[in-house]
Every structure is written in C-alpha cells, then in structure tokens.
Image: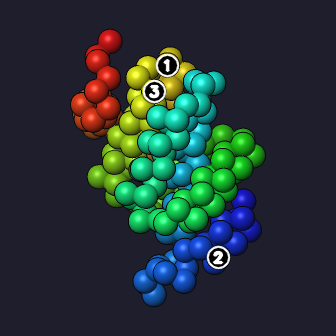
C-alpha cells in the first residue's frame, strides 16, 4: 500500500504542493478517497451520481485536477479492494485530522451514500463503523447525516 501511495503522490501531488507537505498528508488523501470509493461500492450499485459525488468531494477537499483525480480514484479503489478492513485508513485519518475534519469526512461519506437517492442498509452500517473508528460522537454523526440529507435532497425515512 505505501509504495502505491508514494508513487501516486510523487507523480501527481508533490510537484504542486507547499513545501510543508508531508507523506502523512498524502496518505490521508488516499485513505479518505479509499473510504469514499468503498462507500460508493457498498450497495452493489454504482451509478453516475455516486461517482460524481466522490469526484466532487475529492476535488473540493484536495483541489485536484482531472488527471490527479482519476489517478487518486483508481489508486483508492485498488487500496480499498486489497484492504482487509477499514482500520488502516481510519488510523491515518485519526493521526492527521482534528475532530471537525473527521466530522467533515463523515458528512462527505453520507453524501456519497445518499447521492443515488437511496440509503441502503449496508451503507448505513458502514457509516456507523467508520464513524466509530474515527471516534465521531453520536450527535456529530447525526448532524453530519442531516447536513448530507439537506445537501442531497434525500427525504428522511
């Protein structure tokens, strides 16, 4: 996993980043993207709305161009397929992010889950697991879900 992350960032990210950037930030991007891709795949139906939601989130959060975005999504998808669980991704996030940033990640995951207009039970289960691994409290978890509902227009149900 680490070799793939380093190769991606040395090729696409490092030339355009600030000198203060470090490998931890780069790994954080892949970890976040891997969780978003995993959420997109969770309900066994990947549609354009979910793909667009992942792409929009990664562009908004990390400021990537189209080539960087495509490479990150491909790498994240491969990392998610090879991972034995979510702990390796959430550990990177926990080390690099404060509470507000982790809540934003949870909200972005909710947006991907809701992008297709349907919230699947598998998606809800994954959200609870990820929120627990990120140590996001219940009130923040619910608030993030409500903001995502409002943003995606998914009716409560």
According to the image, label 2 marks what residue? 11
146 left or right, relative to 126: left
Helix, strand or loop status at disc 3: loop
| Helix, strand or loop for disc 1 | loop
| Number of the label disc, if any, that sits on residue 116 | 3
Nearest to viewer (mark 3 / mark 1): 3
Q: Are marks 1 and 2 in contact (CB under 8 Å)?
A: no
Q: Which mark is residue 120?
A: 1
**Whole-percent x and y of residue 122?**
55, 21
Residue drawn at (51%, 77%) of the image = 22
Camera-nearest label, 1 or 2: 2
Residue 137 image point, x, y percent: 32, 37
How is the rendered protein coloured?
Answer: rainbow
Q: Position of residue 46 (x, y in %)?
A: 59, 31
Name the residue located 29 percent from the left edge and 18 percent from the top edge: 155
Whether residue 39 is visible, yes or no, is no
Q: Report the residue at 35% width, 40% height from top.
A: 107
**Residue 74 picture location, percent across and down:** 66, 53
Quadrant where the C terminus is found in the figure: top left
């Amino acid at each position: 996993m680490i070799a793939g992350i380093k190769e991606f960032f040395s090729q696409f990210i490092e030339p355009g980043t600030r000198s203060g950037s470090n490998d931890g930030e780069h790994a954080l991007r892949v970890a976040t993207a891997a969780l978003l891709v995993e959420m997109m795949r969770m309900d066994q139906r990947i549609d354009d709305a979910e793909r667009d939601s992942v792409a929009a989130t990664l562009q908004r959060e990390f400021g990537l161009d189209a080539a960087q975005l495509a490479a990150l999504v491909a790498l994240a998808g491969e990392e998610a397929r090879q991972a034995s669980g979510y702990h390796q991704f959430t550990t990177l996030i926990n080390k690099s992010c404060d509470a507000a940033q982790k809540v934003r990640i949870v909200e972005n995951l909710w947006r991907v889950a809701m992008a297709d207009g349907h919230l699947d039970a598998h998606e809800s289960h994954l959200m609870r697991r990820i929120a627990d691994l990120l140590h996001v409290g219940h009130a923040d978890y619910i608030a993030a879900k409500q903001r995502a509902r409002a943003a995606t227009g998914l009716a409560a149900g």
